[in-house]
Amino acid sequence: MNKEIEAAFNDHLNAELYSSYLYLSMSNYFAAESLDGMTSWMRIQADEEHVHGMKFIDFINERNGRVVLQQIDTPKIEWSKPLDAFEEAYEHECLISSKINTLVDLAAKHSDHAVIAFLQWFINEQVEEEATAMAIVDKLKMIGDNPMGLFMIDQQLSERTAEAPEAT
């Protein structure tokens, strides 16, 4: 594995693990607010991001690279309302998409087609991640400060189930 790509993948691995940490923190915020559906939704999201990190670890190892685990920053723990948390989740997904696009550009620079093929899954996943987060933001904006609306969206989000991780 090209050393520049390896270093960038290790940095991105850290970003994926931070994503998991951030969503776990959001899950705990929602738990403190007695929003069980949002708690569950974010917990599943945190688990999904952890799986994404594992995919990067597996790929680095398969390419005879060296995984270098880095310190994970402490995420914030409080938001003023659920909308703020989901807006931050959307912005974070946009940041991750940007980081993945940078990885694709780096792989293209080095003509590393295996890396490009690997990253294609993440490109598609990020389209879904951004759309899902924005849909929740839009609904939360629509309901405003209506407690019944918040109750209803919390119930809707409780219907999310964890998907079985794909084999790598």
Image (cartoon, helix red, strand yellow):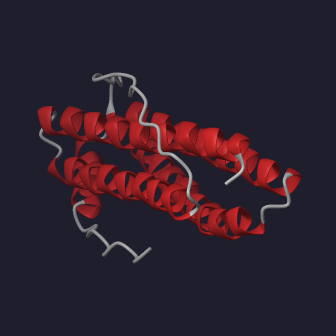
Side of 142 relative to 165 (left or right):
right
Q: Is residue 1 above or below residue 13?
A: below
Is 25 in front, or is 90? 25
Q: Position of residue 6 (x, y in %)?
A: 63, 45
Is 160 in front, or is 75? 75
Q: Residue at x 21, y 59 (%)?
A: 155
Q: Is residue 38 above or below residue 157?
A: above
Q: Position of residue 106 (x, y in %)?
A: 79, 47
Q: Residue 144: in sight, yes or no?
A: no
Q: Is residue 22 above or below residue 120?
A: above
Q: Residue at x 73, y 64 (%)?
A: 116
Task: Report which quarter residue 98 is drawn in.
Answer: top right
> Where is the C terminus found, in terms of image quarters?
bottom left
Q: Residue at x 69, y 62 (%)?
A: 115
Side of 56 relative to 149 (left or right):
right
Is 40 in front, or is 166? 166
Q: Position of residue 21 (x, y in %)?
A: 33, 37
| Count of marks, rendered view | 0
Q: Residue 162: in sight, yes or no?
A: yes
> Where is the N terminus found, in terms of image quarters?
bottom right
Is 90 in front, or is 110? 110
Furthest residue toward front: 64
